[in-house]
Image (tube, helix red, strand yellow):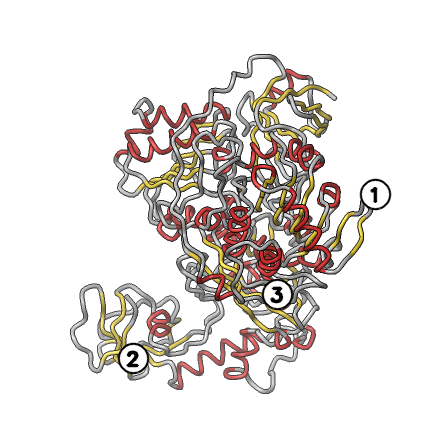
């Protein structure tokens, strides 16, 4: 309950106390700090180290206030951020003693701070600048030499100018409490205190950019944005993160239509005030060299030529007219907006085509899986008392869900993991089961049936949640794992959360981007005469990349594409350039089922158009129903949500890996290679978590094959093969081979049983 002004110091409700701040009587929660009560009442108190989402440090001393208890003044000014409210307390933020304490603190903070505001990226949005106007002296009394601190390389995302640091320690608390990596700390003491990493290595956390947001000075700034613009040149537009299904709220900052940077937009139910690095820095990929900016068609000799929109749409229309019905396949990227998805569903229906799907990385369709909203909302996960992770690494799949899980652990929750890899989850596990992928379903079902001691623990939980990740959901026997997870959730009265693949899988299922005919795998296994690809990079966005290459290469292809990549040009006959989310009006539905709409922000490059406009023109040209609307409002008015749910079929059991050198592949998506935009962000590709393609084996398995770290291994399955360098880790289950997807070197390798040998 927030602090509320009252006319008089009336009796406080239970759990509240009566206080008075600057003559305003308030009710404030018992045990809360003065600064929190003042903030709720709209009474300003200056601060640098205090942040409402971080533990209290009380080291900048900028928030000094004068207090009275029982009519008697407390002898010394008190830090408002670390002084709890008490019944009958009176607080003065503007008294002579309080203002003197605040001004003295400001003078000390400015002693060693350099006067380099004209060249500082924080200039114009600097908390130190702002407060120094009100609390600083016009002339400094400090005549000695200012200290200088050597900068440390924190990696490709965060720039450092540590001479500007005022030791507020917000960045330390972010890496410790939010990220959980404890990478930053204070070294030495007094004036020699400096903030940095103990080992001198770059930051490795996927939430590193948040240290920029909390830094009140220019000590930590955005390295990608550095020196590119001044804050007062920028225009802010609301947007969304579109690299996972959380739908983080953010602002993109524009200069003359170009997206210069992204910063968090507060939304307590979604991302609070934080942002993952891939949502913060992905704008770099918008301006890649191979961005599609002009419609292109391929002539009879296989030569590409640029053309007008009319010519490109005419060519695309002729292909679709000639391949109506079952001869056509429509494949849609799962980050596509609701508006575009609804039009694609109308287009497929108008052409008599039931072959439309967005589940590009699904390997098992036996139970007709559909992305559904979380059973337990993201914001409620931090209040769970038992969490079961199945085939899941939330740090890479949804970084801010991992943050919520970490908050739950700090509140006392127990986390259990059933994985083929013992991932570094940055919080303690109450128990773990590290098993081969094919044993996931049996391990989960055993708990559900009460055959495992973990069943007794989960039955006593009052607020449990089972979380399914991509290893489970994209496994060749995913239907069995899903069925076991549902049994477990029912047995322990838990909610079931399945992390969908793609930013808008929930929304696309609702607007009908699901097959009444062939699913995505069947469309590729049984090639169609023509395909419509929407926002897809053919070589890297499919689970069955080799099958996709063969099917698309032998068919006519109309590609609605953001990039004119080599793989797209190799299979397409027409490339229609479309805008990405920061450049178009769009609605995405996140894992809570929340439909979030944002306006267009960045300027579309070249002749690129919003996808919904291109689809409207194409549908009208083909004379199809549902394309008569004139604007986006008309389109949205005609969208009707469809209620769909997964079925109950089961995939056949896969044979066990019995022969020497045969392994079960563990497939994960690299955190910064999940979509075409991320793959083109040079800063993210240089980050510590970005690694080249490799195969990770248990040391005992590698020794049995005569493989050592760094050696080249030949990896093959029934469909294709590749050569990958070997990495060793005891975290990988015996009999398993961990190979990340979305690399050219791994595209030809299947997702089930593979053979590994010395190259």
In this figure, which residue is indicated by the disc labeled 1? Answer: 301
Q: Is residue 163 left or right of residue 15?
A: right
x 71%, y 55%: residue: 312
Q: Nearer the viewer, residue 629 or 708?
A: 629
Q: Sequence-wise, which precedes: disc 3 or disc 2?
A: 2
Any part of residue 246 in sight: yes
Q: Count the marks: how many? A: 3
The circle drawn on residue 446 is none
Distance from Cα at disc 1 to Cα at disc 2: 90 Å
x 58%, y 52%: residue: 278
Distance from Cα at disc 3 to Cα at disc 2: 38 Å
Q: Is residue 96 left or right of residue 73?
A: right
In this figure, which residue is indicated by the disc labeled 2? Answer: 73
Q: Sequence-wise, which precedes: disc 1 or disc 3?
A: 3
Q: Secondary structure at mark 3?
A: loop
- Comparing marks 3 and 2, which lies closer to the viewer? 3
Q: Secondary structure at mark 2?
A: strand
Above or below 667: residue 116: below
Percent of width and height locating residue 739: 61, 32
Distance from Cα at disc 1 to Cα at disc 3: 57 Å
Q: Are marks 3 and 2 in contact (CB under 8 Å)?
A: no
Percent of width and height locating residue 15: 21, 63
Residue 327 lies in what quarter of the image?
A: top right
Any part of residue 201 in sight: no
Above or below 84: residue 131: below
Percent of width and height locating residue 677: 64, 52
In this figure, which residue is indicated by the disc labeled 3? Answer: 219
x 43%, y 74%: residue: 63
Q: Nearer the viewer, residue 17 or 605?
A: 605
Q: Nearer the viewer, residue 302 or 187?
A: 302
| Quarter of the image where the C terminus is located | top right
Percent of width and height locating residue 263: 55, 64
């Amino acid at each position: 309950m927030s602090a509320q002004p009252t006319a008089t110091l009336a009796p406080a409700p239970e759990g509240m106390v009566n206080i008075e701040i600057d003559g305003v009587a308030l009710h404030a929660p018992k045990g809360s700090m003065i600064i929190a009560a003042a903030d709720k009442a709209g009474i300003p108190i200056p601060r640098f180290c205090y942040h409402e989402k971080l533990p209290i440090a009380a080291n900048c001393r900028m928030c000094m206030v004068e207090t009275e208890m029982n009519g008697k003044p407390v002898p010394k000014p008190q830090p408002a951020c670390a002084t709890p409210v008490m019944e009958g307390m009176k607080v003065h933020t503007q008294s002579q003693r309080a203002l003197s304490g605040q001004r003295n603190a400001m003078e000390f903070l400015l002693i060693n701070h350099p006067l380099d505001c004209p060249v500082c990226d924080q200039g114009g949005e600097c908390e130190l600048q702002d407060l120094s106007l009100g609390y600083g002296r016009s002339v400094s009394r400090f005549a000695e030499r200012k200290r200088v601190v050597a900068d440390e390389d924190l990696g490709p995302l965060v720039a450092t100018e540590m001479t500007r640091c005022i030791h507020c320690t917000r960045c330390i608390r972010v890496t410790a409490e939010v990220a959980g990596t404890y990478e930053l700390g204070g070294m030495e003491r007094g004036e020699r205190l400096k903030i940095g990493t103990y080992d001198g290595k770059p930051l490795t956390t996927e939430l590193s950019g948040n240290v920029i947001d909390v830094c009140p000075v220019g000590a930590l700034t955005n390295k990608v944005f550095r020196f590119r613009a001044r804050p007062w040149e920028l225009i802010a537009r609301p947007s969304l993160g579109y690299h996972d299904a959380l739908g983080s709220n953010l602002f993109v900052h524009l200069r003359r239509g170009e997206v210069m940077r992204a910063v968090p937009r507060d939304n307590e139910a979604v991302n609070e005030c934080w942002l993952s690095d891939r949502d913060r820095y992905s704008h770099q990929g918008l301006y890649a060299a191979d961005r599609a900016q002009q419609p292109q068609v391929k002539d009879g000799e296989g030569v590409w030529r640029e053309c007008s929109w009319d010519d490109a749409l005419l060519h695309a229309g002729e292909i679709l007219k000639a391949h109506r019905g079952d001869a056509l396949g429509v494949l849609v990227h799962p980050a596509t907006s609701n508006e575009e998805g609804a039009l694609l569903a109308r287009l497929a229906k108008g052409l008599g085509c039931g072959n439309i799907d967005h589940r590009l990385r699904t390997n098992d369709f036996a139970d007709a899986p559909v992305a559904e909203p979380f059973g337990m909302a993201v914001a409620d996960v931090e209040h769970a008392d038992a969490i079961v992770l199945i085939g899941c690494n939330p740090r890479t799949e949804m970084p801010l869900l991992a943050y919520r899980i970490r908050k739950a652990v700090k509140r006392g929750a127990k986390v259990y993991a059933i994985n083929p890899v013992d991932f570094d989850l940055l919080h303690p596990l109450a128990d773990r089961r590290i098993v081969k992928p094919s044993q996931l379903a049996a391990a989960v079902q055993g708990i559900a049936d009460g055959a495992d001691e973990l069943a007794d623990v989960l039955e006593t939980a009052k607020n449990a949640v089972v979380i399914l990740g991509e290893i489970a959901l994209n496994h060749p026997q995913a239907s069995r794992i899903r069925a076991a997870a549902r049994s477990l959730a029912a047995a322990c009265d838990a909610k079931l959360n399945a992390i969908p693949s793609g930013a808008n899988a929930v929304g696309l299922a609702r607007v009908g981007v699901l097959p009444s005919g062939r699913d995505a795998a069947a469309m590729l296994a049984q090639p169609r005469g023509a395909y419509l690809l929407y926002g897809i990079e053919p070589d890297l966005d499919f689970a069955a990349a080799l099958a996709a290459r063969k099917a698309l290469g032998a068919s006519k292809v109309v590609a609605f594409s953001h990039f004119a990549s080599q793989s797209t040009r190799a299979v397409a006959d027409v490339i229609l350039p479309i805008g990405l989310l920061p450049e178009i009006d769009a609605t995405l539905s996140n894992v809570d089922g929340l439909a979030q709409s944002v306006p267009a922000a960045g300027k579309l490059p070249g002749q690129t158009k919003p996808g919904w406009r291109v689809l409207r023109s194409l549908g009208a040209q083909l004379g199809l129903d549902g394309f008569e609307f004139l604007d986006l409002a008309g389109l949205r008015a005609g969208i009707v949500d469809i209620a769909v749910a997964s079925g109950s079929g089961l995939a056949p059991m896969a044979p066990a890996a019995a022969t020497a050198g045969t392994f079960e592949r563990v497939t994960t998506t690299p955190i910064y290679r999940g979509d075409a935009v991320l793959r083109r962000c040079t800063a993210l590709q240089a980050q510590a978590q970005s690694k080249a393609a490799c195969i990770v084996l248990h040391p005992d398995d590698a020794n049995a094959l005569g493989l050592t770290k760094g050696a080249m291994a030949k990896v093959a399955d029934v469909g294709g093969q590749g050569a990958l360098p070997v990495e060793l880790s005891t975290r990988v289950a015996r009999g398993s081979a961990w190979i990340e997807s979305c690399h050219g070197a791994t595209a030809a390798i299947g997702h089930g049983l593979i053979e590994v040998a010395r190259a």
